Image: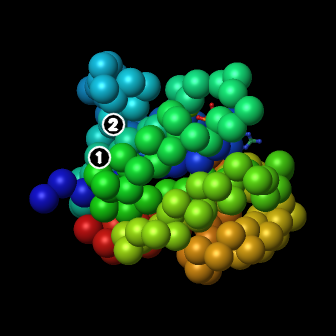
Amino acid sequence: MANIVAIVGRPNVGKSTLFNRLVGERKAIMDNVSGVTRDRHYGYGEWCGKFYTVIDTGGYVHGSDDIFEGEIRKQVELAIKEATVILFMVDVDAGLTGLDEEFADVLRRTDKPVFIVANKADTNLRAHLAGEFYALGLGDNIFPISSANGSGTGDLLDEVVKHF
Ligand code: GDP
Ligand code: MG
């Protein structure tokens, strides 16, 4: 059975940056599936001898007052259905937002493992800000990382592959 890691979260938190890091050199064989799976990117990676598929969700339609309804909700629900593990990305720079809480409300309903990935924790000082996201009510699986410089991503993957 395929191991599928889905990255979800509001626009601009760094999902695509993490995606590129998780698929590494293998992004050459990444598929950009058009049609029903518009703007979902699939890539392939390996960690500690375990192989996985990563889904980068995104390309959300902007401009609506309630941007969560419609495209975003569909993407999250599809990700929950497809995924083995869900990476719910938030941003320590911006802090906890109302849109993050809307994602959390949907993610709380799945039995699948959800990791809160607190991105943009580029320094140790910033990593401490990740504690704010306990308030999402999704447990204490919170990993401060920096998709930009790679810090914390190894610790995250060590835990993710335990579910494969
Ligand atoms: P997405 O919309 O969630 O896919 O986010 P992107 O991956 O496109 O990143 C949004 C912005 O955040 C870009 O300007 C990135 O360069 C920046 N970014 C992503 N990851 C990090 C990070 O770990 N640290 C910092 N400081 N910026 C980041
Ligand atoms: Mg993106």
Pick the residue in front: 85 or 104: 104
Q: Mark 2: which secondary structure? A: strand
Q: How is the image coloured?
A: rainbow
Disc 2 residue type (three-letter): Gly
Q: Position of residue 7 (x, y in %)?
A: 48, 48
Any part of residue 152 in sight: no
Residue 93 vs 34, above or below: the answer is below
Q: Quadrant of residue 151?
A: bottom right
The residue singled out by tag 1 in the image is 53
**Which mark, by number, is residue 140?**
none
Q: What residue is shown at x 44% (from left), y 41% (from top)?
A: 74
Q: Residue 13: x, y in percent?
A: 68, 43
Q: What residue sits right under mark 2 in the picture?
A: 43
- Residue at the image point whose x is 59% and y is 47% from the top: 9
Query: Position of 121 compared to 114: left or right?
Result: right
> Around disc 1, counting alpha carbons within 10 Å, would you say few (fewer than 14), some (14 to 19), or many (20 or more)?
many
**Crowd band around label 2 with a 10 angstrom C-alpha radius: few (<14), some (14–19), many (20+):** many
- Asked whether 64 or 94 is in front, the reply is 64
How much space separates mark 1 and mark 2, taking CA atoms?
6 Å
Q: Quadrant of the N terminus?
A: bottom left
SS at circle 1: strand
User: Which image quadrant is residue 103 in?
Assistant: bottom right
Q: Is residue 25 left or right of residue 117?
A: left
Residue 111 horizontal/vertical position (percent): 38, 74
Image height of 143 relative to 93, above or below: below
- Front one among 56 and 123: 56
Q: Tags 1 and 2 in contact by the CB under 8 Å rule?
A: yes
- Which quarter of the figure is the C terminus placed in? bottom left
Lower position in the chain sequence, tag 1 or tag 2: 2
